[in-house]
């Protein structure tokens, strides 16, 4: 019906290419357009002005000889003022775009190592966009944005990279664990040293208290009982402690056995040994 009335409907976000006897006449904008077929006018085709996206997968090799698949996403659209160029100069724009993407990626990626490819993917995308925009503008297409959406190395390379990363993390964890164990051992050794120091200090104070008590007892007994020497008092004290020790050993419920020389001579030997020890300590203190 539209052809009989010489009218053509162009949809929104589209343009139509009008020809007259096979020659380009004009670009028809959206809306109802008059195309008198009786004088040789007709619509040769339509172009969409919508934003279009093309994903391109390109396999290439890096500088360190690793094969990677780079996926680039190209967003483009037809320029309204160059719609005739987009319609007549390119029969398959997607093929042309892919060719430029392949050319730029395979020129940039082989100059970089694998790690640098991941780090400089924005620079690669910018290079692709600049080259595409410069080339496709002449054909009536505008490149709005280019994104590198994926960089996929070979599966064996990915597995090796993951193993290297895992080994590095395990090495760091082992170092941290060893450092923690070292700190624990140092703190344990410092605690044991402090404990032994305090224990020795307590034993020294205990022995000093015993010596002070014995001295006070000897002096007090000798002062209250005339004619008694310090030796007699010390022998009596030793005898008393000897019998107290024997009583404690006999009253103990433990099964261990202790053999101590028993008899009057044994007490004298013990007293002599203690006395000699005290005299030697006193001599060393005065020296």
Image (cartoon, rainbow, N blue to C red):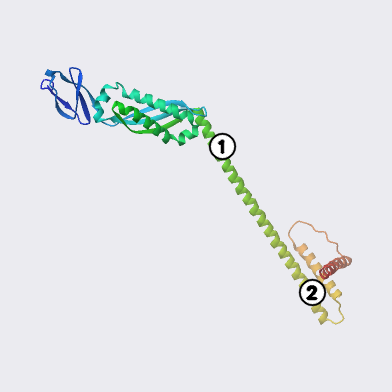
Q: Camera-side residue: 218 or 186?
A: 186
Task: Report how far apart the C-alphas of labels 2 and 1 lie in the structure.
Answer: 71 Å
Q: Quadrant of residue 84?
A: top left
| Mark 1 crowd level (few <14, some 14–19, many ≥20, 10 Å Cα) | few
- Please state the horizontal and vertical placement of residue 89, each as a whole percent of the image: 28, 22
Instruction: Say if 232 sits above or below 34 in the image.
Output: below
- Please state the horizontal and vertical placement of residue 45, each as a whole percent of the image: 22, 22
Q: Nearer the viewer, mark 2 or mark 1?
A: 1
Q: Is residue 215 left or right of residue 128?
A: right
SS state under label 1? helix
| Mark 2 crowd level (few <14, some 14–19, many ≥20, 10 Å Cα) | few
SS state under label 2? helix
Quadrant location, the C terminus: bottom right
| Image disc number at residue 215 | 2
Which residue ends up furthest to the right in the rendered image? 265
Q: Camera-side residue: 196 or 209?
A: 196
Location of mark 1 (residue): 167
Q: Residue at x 75, y 63 (%)?
A: 251
Q: Quadrant of residue 58?
A: top left
Q: Camera-side residue: 16 or 72?
A: 16
| Image disc number at residue 99 | none
- Please state the horizontal and vertical placement of residue 11, each as a whole percent of the image: 19, 29
- Please state the horizontal and vertical placement of residue 256, each as a whole percent of the image: 77, 56
Q: Residue at x 70, y 61 (%)?
A: 197
Which residue ends up furthest to the left in the rendered image? 5
């Amino acid at each position: 019906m539209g052809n009989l009335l010489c009218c053509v409907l162009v949809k929104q976000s589209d343009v139509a290419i009008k020809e007259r006897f096979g020659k380009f006449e004009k670009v028809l904008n959206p809306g109802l357009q008059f195309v008198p077929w009786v004088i040789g006018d007709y619509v040769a085709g339509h172009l969409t002005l919508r934003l279009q996206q093309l994903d391109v997968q390109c396999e290439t090799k890096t500088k360190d000889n690793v094969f990677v698949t780079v996926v680039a996403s190209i967003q483009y659209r037809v320029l309204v003022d160059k719609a005739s160029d987009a319609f007549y100069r390119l029969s398959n724009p997607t093929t042309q775009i892919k060719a430029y993407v392949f050319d730029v990626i395979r020129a940039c990626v082989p100059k970089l190592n694998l790690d640098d490819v991941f780090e400089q993917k924005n620079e690669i995308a910018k290079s692709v966009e600049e080259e595409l925009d410069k080339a496709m503008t002449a054909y009536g297409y505008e490149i709005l944005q280019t994104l590198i959406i994926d960089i996929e190395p070979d599966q064996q390379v990915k597995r090796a990279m993951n193993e290297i990363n895992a080994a590095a993390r395990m090495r760091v964890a082992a170092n941290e664990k060893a450092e923690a164990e070292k700190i624990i051992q140092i703190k344990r050794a410092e605690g044991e040293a402090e404990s032994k120091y305090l224990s020795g200090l307590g034993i020294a104070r205990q022995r000093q208290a015993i010596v002070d008590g014995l001295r006070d007892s000897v002096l007090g007994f000798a002062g209250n009982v005339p004619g008694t020497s310090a030796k007699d008092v010390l022998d009596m004290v030793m005898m008393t402690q000897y019998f107290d020790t024997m009583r404690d050993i006999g009253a103990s419920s433990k099964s261990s056995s202790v053999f101590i020389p028993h008899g009057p001579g044994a007490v004298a030997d013990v007293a002599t040994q203690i006395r000699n020890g005290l005299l030697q300590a006193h001599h060393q203190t005065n020296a």
